[in-house]
Image (tube, helix red, strand yellow):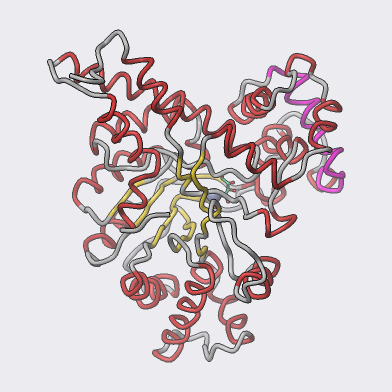
Amino acid sequence: MAGAVNRENLDRIVGEIVQNTPVTDIHTHLYDPAFGDILLWGVDELITYHYLIAETMRWVDLPYEEYWRLSKVEQANLVWQTLFLDNSPYSEACRGVLTTLKALGLDVASRDLKAYRKYFGIRQVAEYVDQVFQIANLECVVMTNDPFDPVERRIWLDEVRTGKMERDQRFQAALRLDVLLNNWDTAWPQLKEWGFSVTAKLNEDTIQEVQRFLREWLEIMEPVYMAVSLPYDFQLPETSARATLIEKCIIPISRETGIPFAPMVGVRRRINPDLKDAGDGVGKMDIASIEYLCASFPENKFLVTLLSRENQHELAVLARKFRNLLPFGCWWFLNNPSLIEEITRMRLELLGTSTILQHSDARVLDQLIYKWDHSRQVITGTLVEKYADLLATGWILTEDEIKRDVEKLMGGNLWTFLERSI
Ligand code: FIX
Ligand code: ZN
């Protein structure tokens, strides 16, 4: 059979296919370069990633406020000295910096931070975006777009809505609703100020007005999904403002428009507030809340990622029961090779090809390089194992079939789920 795969050529064929399949990165914190400075990139941003700040502060005897008072370059110097020079940098976030520098052609052995700064100092963002997309082999990335963020809001209203800005389609939007759903007490006065006739009490008029707000932003952003990050103790059903907003506003609008709702659950926000973004932790959630959503709203689509390792098996089992649920990615503290491997293997065993294996969560453009390099390595190894098991039964596989599967797992399933293309 043409393109037949055997145990001898399997590693090479799977490796090449995973490498050559462009990814849809379903969750990042990156922005269309036309949005300006809010797109972070360059070596100082890479080194001051909040994952690395958390690791640095375990070593240094420095009050947190003093760290935050340092300039970006001083912060990066401290992280570099502490994690890269005084210790071997094999934590996943440290290794990622080195993978990235190497892929860009920089001399990692030199440990010369000044030389790396010089390299980035002469880059132009537009061409650098192309370079990163090419190295990481990405088709597109999905942003995280908060209509309550004053900087973003201004860009969407003044630049995008008016047609002044030419959008880069490689950066798709996701309407992020943390403020609306997790902070109704601050959300409703803000909505009121923007001209929505809402009250603290979620009466019928307020529900209609929140729906109007959502419709407006769906029209402005044209997002791929509506997302929210939820704490580990999130519960549905319940009588809270959040539960009412989800059931009475998000669910009907999501059904009406076919735009999925994406709960990202399991955060313990700011368990050490002094660490700011680096101060969040993880907790196990009750999967019954996701089950409730999938079972109660069969016409709705749910994209779900969970933060706790303990919830991953339950999520995969749930997805076997509900085709309106698509689990995605190994989020945040799960985005480490050992856990990606475990979760990927388990998902392939329980769900076959009907999942999205990974997202990057990149906050800094350059991180796309390492996050996808490291994930691709793990995905390749795990897929080789699974295809080898198939070959051992006498099953015949073709390269085209492996390509078909990998395209789905690397993000193609998102577009099928959405019933649209990019
Ligand atoms: O809520 C989220 O989307 C989280 O991914 C982030 O806010 C978190 O700080 C992060 O960067 C994780 O990778
Ligand atoms: Zn994120």
Which image quadrant is residue 24 in? top left
Q: Residue at x 50, y 80 (%)?
A: 213
Task: Classify the position of the N terminus by image quarter.
Answer: top left
Q: In this view, does 160 lie to the left or right of 347?
A: right
Q: Nearer the viewer, residue 163 or 285?
A: 163
Residue 143 place in picture, x, y as percent: 55, 54
In the rendered image of this protein, does residue 389 appear above or below residue 373? Answer: above
Name the residue at the top extreme: 8
Q: Is residue 27 left or right of residue 121?
A: left
In magenta segment, residue 408: no
Residue 36 place in picture, x, y as percent: 73, 57
Q: Which residue is drawn at 65% across and 28% down?
A: 100
Q: Nearer the viewer, residue 245 or 399?
A: 399
The image shows a total of numbered marks equal to: 0
In the rendered image of this protein, does residue 407 appear above or below residue 166? Answer: above
Which image quadrant is residue 41 in? top right
Residue 293 place in picture, x, y as percent: 29, 62
Task: Classify the position of the C terminus by image quarter.
Answer: bottom left
Query: Which region shows up in magenta?
Result: 67-88
